[in-house]
């Protein structure tokens, strides 16, 4: 990154890899509407982020239920309080909807909402949320996807455990404000047999391309391409950890709203 875009160390201690070739990445995105960027952070930053996601994040279970208005969020304590019988019934209902391509089930930490609502003061993920709003990161993303401007970066941390999934969909946004989707992947030693693949689906319902979760990898792609996260296998050796969201061009940056 010879011109220094994104190379500066933020006040939060997070920084992009200074050796990224922005022009080559932008050319790849312009060609494919998709780019996969290895070693997006220096290794020490990636290790710290993995530690936060794998050991220090208070996950919530998220699933889709149209009868309850869409997304339903439960703490792990609330889920445990259901007891085995009600948990089994809930799981069966989720899978029945998924069979008809309706829904998702995974663990999440809503980073934007948590920061704005003052959850978990001092949690490291708040630092990540702030870093994603910095001019350095937004300018890096803007240049790679070839967008006139990026004013906000949505973010939620996600963990897909065995049996969890995200059915095929497109990321349109309420006001067409989403310029590109992104996934920051921190899945160590992931094998393709473990599922959890980011899959792009063609109009005839074939898989155009599918990517195995990686470690310290940023994937940027056109969210209007139909995509899914395939179900994580029961024999997966670790959780599928990532930070995901969209690069957006809303009128005002998130930092002005905090």
Image (cartoon, rainbow, N blue to C red):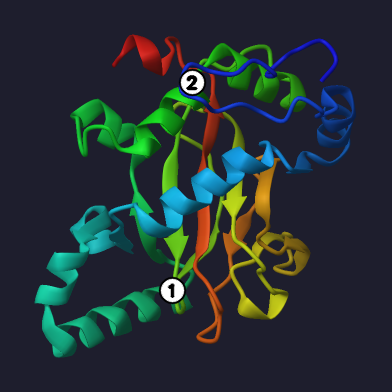
Tell me the mark number nearer the camera, choosing from 2 and 1. 2
Image x and y of residue 201, in percent: 70, 61
Q: Is residue 171 above or below residue 252?
A: below
Query: Residue 55 or 205: which is nearer the viewer?
Result: 55
Q: Which residue is mark 2?
A: 133
Q: CA distance from mark 2 to mark 1?
A: 34 Å
Quarter of the image with the C terminus is top left
Quarter of the image for residue 175 reads top left
Image x and y of residue 130, in percent: 42, 24
Quarter of the image for residue 76 reads bottom left
Q: Which mark is residue 165?
A: none
The residue drawn where x is 68% and y is 47% is 217
From the viewer's perspective, tell me whether residue 19 is left or right of residue 74.
Answer: right
Query: Residue 22 or 92: which is nearer the viewer?
Result: 22
From the viewer's perspective, tell me whether residue 121 is left or right of residue 214.
Answer: left
The residue drawn where x is 58% and y is 38% is 45
Of all residues shown, which one is farthest toward the left? 81
Image x and y of residue 77, in percent: 14, 66
Q: Is residue 72 above or below residue 129?
A: below
Q: Which residue is mark 1?
A: 98
């Amino acid at each position: 990154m010879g011109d220094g875009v994104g190379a500066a160390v933020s006040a939060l201690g997070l920084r992009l890899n200074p050796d990224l070739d922005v022009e080559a990445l932008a050319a790849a995105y312009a060609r494919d509407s998709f780019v996969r960027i290895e070693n997006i952070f220096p290794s020490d930053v990636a290790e710290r982020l993995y530690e936060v996601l794998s050991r220090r994040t208070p996950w919530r279970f998220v699933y889709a239920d149209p009868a309850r208005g869409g997304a339903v969020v439960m703490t792990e304590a609330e889920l445990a309080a259901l007891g085995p019988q009600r948990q089994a019934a809930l799981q069966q209902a989720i899978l029945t909807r998924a069979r008809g391509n309706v829904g998702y089930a995974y663990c999440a930490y809503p980073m934007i909402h948590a920061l704005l609502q003052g959850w978990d003061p001092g949690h490291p993920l708040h630092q990540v949320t702030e870093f994603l709003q910095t001019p350095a990161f937004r300018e890096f993303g803007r240049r790679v996807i070839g967008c006139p401007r990026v004013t906000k970066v949505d973010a939620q941390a996600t963990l897909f455990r065995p049996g969890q999934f995200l059915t095929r969909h497109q990321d349109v946004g309420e006001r067409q404000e989403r310029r590109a989707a992104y996934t920051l992947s921190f899945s160590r030693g992931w094998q393709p047999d473990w599922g959890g693949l980011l899959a792009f689906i063609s109009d005839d319902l074939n898989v155009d391309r599918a990517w195995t979760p990686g470690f310290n990898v940023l994937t940027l792609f056109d969210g209007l391409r139909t995509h899914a996260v395939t179900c994580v296998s029961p024999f997966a050796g670790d959780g599928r950890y990532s930070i995901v969201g969209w690069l957006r061009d809303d009128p005002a940056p998130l930092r002005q709203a905090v």
